[in-house]
Amino acid sequence: MTRYRYAYNALVYYGEDIADSIDRVARLGYDAIEVVGEPAELDPKRIKRLTDDAGITVSSICSIYTPERDLAHPDPAVRANAVQYVKDVADFAATMGAPTIIVHPTACMKTQPLAAPEDERRWAVEGIRAAGEYAAPLEVNLSLECWNRYETYFMNRLEQAASLWREVGLSNGGIQGDTFHMSLEEASIPDAFRQYGALLQHVHLADSNRAAPGAGHLDFLPILQALIDVGYSGYLSFELLPASADPFGAMKAGGQEAFFDQYTEQAIRHMKEVESRLQEAA
Amino acid sequence: MRFGASTFIWESPFGDDKLHLAQRVASLGFDTLEICIEDPARVSADAVRRAAVDAGVTIAVCGAFGPNRDVSHEESSRRRLGIDYLKTCIDLAAAVGAPNVIGPMYSATGKTRLLPDSEREQQRTWAADSLREVGQYAAARGVGLAIEPLNRFETDLVNTVEQGLDLCGRIGLDNVGLLLDTFHMNIEEKSIPGAITAAGTRLRHFHACENDRGAPGSGHVEWDDVFAALAGTGYDGLVVIESFTPEIKEIARAVSTWRPVAQSGDALARDGLAFLKQKVLAQA
């Protein structure tokens, strides 16, 4: 029986010192923390020391794809900047011993192409390949994450990520599903994980409303069963965000206390209950 | 239970020149064509009524809410434009025998701002005051309003049934209720059947859509639970399949549909209707 390792994405702990975030996830029984990919703002050596002291690891880096970090942008300077960003995040991850950095080919919330689809795809493939080749000797893996239709037009389903990943042709990494996005885009979340399970590098969990598992209507039992059946052995990382088209703005505005202690505790408890039920059934 | 199909499955903008869709939905087995009034100048009541009678279908009337039809805008002149537009839709509904004017009529679709609580409260008050005037106008013509909550990426004002019921309460009219849509509820509600039950007798219209906007039955919405909850509320209104053709760029962009979710509009409507009818039979 697989016993999954859990991480919580510090993205939602907006405005908090990472030391407090690390302390919280360690205290609430997590194996790891997912760190926001802002190498210029966060000190990876300090995070490495803090996580070592707390007895946890860094599971992954949640990269932030802004319009200036668009791997499929028609302007070569923007693409070069985007590739450099992914390389910087790879260095950042390597310093903390994090095995995975998350990659999406375009900017988050970009819902209109700026060039012909075949050009955008070629640029994305070239950029991801260049960054991945840089990351390989650092023992850092790329994880191509799908987002829902309101956050990107480029890659919404695992099928699309699998196709892109195969074209990129790297051996260090794979694709990523996030159950919140999948709940909008996939006909069946467990079936999608089964179909593309061999390519999975990383998994984000959130309920149907992006709150902690148990707070929405997703049934995580068949989802976890599918991940076990395909032999997924990576981290299960909770990426929970407020119910807004601008979740980071909502965090800045405040009033989202539930995402700190309450959901951090509830998320792992819910998934461990699901794991226990699967174990009893086995 | 009666079933309808939205004009958005095939065409946008709707107008008298698209009334062949009445025959199309009739031949696919639907009882009702839901027409979206993007531009009232393109639609005449006489032509719609005639096409509906010829095809043997009834008409549902849905509004489309852009920045110049915003009944909760901070400028009263903009609110007035929204009120006037809704009255035009009500006149049309009355003339073609549609029971309700439906849609996310409380704000401009796509407005997703972060507002302090006091400003949000003011916006809700404007929405309620505007829609009370509209609702009274509708009542005098034997028409109702069915207000549609949208998911977080499409509006900041009414995302959940609970928020929709709060708005209905502020409006305070018997002919004003809700339109619930399974696509939006899949994102926002903790329990879809629970939300339908909470709406209860306020439910005036229903959109049956899959979680990815494909044909009902092709995704992960739990339809048995949906229909059990509808039966529990005693709902006897329309169940309409709404999806958006990805072939028309403007509408695809407006609803973020980047890929075909079915082989064709006809396939989506036909497969969806066959599935829904089978689910209703199973309930009976």
Image (spheres, rainbow, N blue to C red):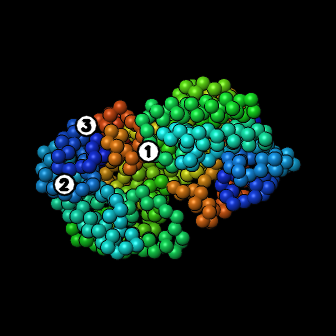
Q: Are marks 3 and 2 on the same chain?
A: yes
Q: CA distance from mark 2 to mark 1?
A: 31 Å
Q: Dot 3: few (<14), some (14–19), or many (≥20) neighbours within 10 Å?
A: some
Badge 3 and badge 1 both on one subunit: no
Res. A112 mark? 1
| Nearest to the observer: residue A278 or residue A144 | A144
The label number, if any, that marks residue A68 in the structure image: none
Secondary structure under the numbered disc 3 in the rendered image? loop
Determine which residue is flagged by label 2. B43
Subunit bearing disc 3:
B
Q: Which mark is residue B28?
A: 3
Which is more foreground, mark 3 or mark 1? 1
Depth check, front residue: B205 or A138: A138
Q: Residue at position x 32%, y 54% from top?
A: B237
Q: Residue furthest front?
A: A77
Q: Kindly identify the amino acid type of the residue bearing the numbered disc 1.
A: Gln
Chain letter behind tag 2 = B
The quadrant where residue B22 appears = top left
* Residue depicted at x 20% and y 45%: B18
- Mark 1 — on which chain does it sit? A
Q: Are marks 3 and 1 in contact (CB under 8 Å)?
A: no
The relative height of residue B233 versus residue B82 in the rendered view (above or below) is above
Viewer-closest of B265 and B247: B247
Q: Earlier in the sequence, mark 3 or mark 2?
A: 3
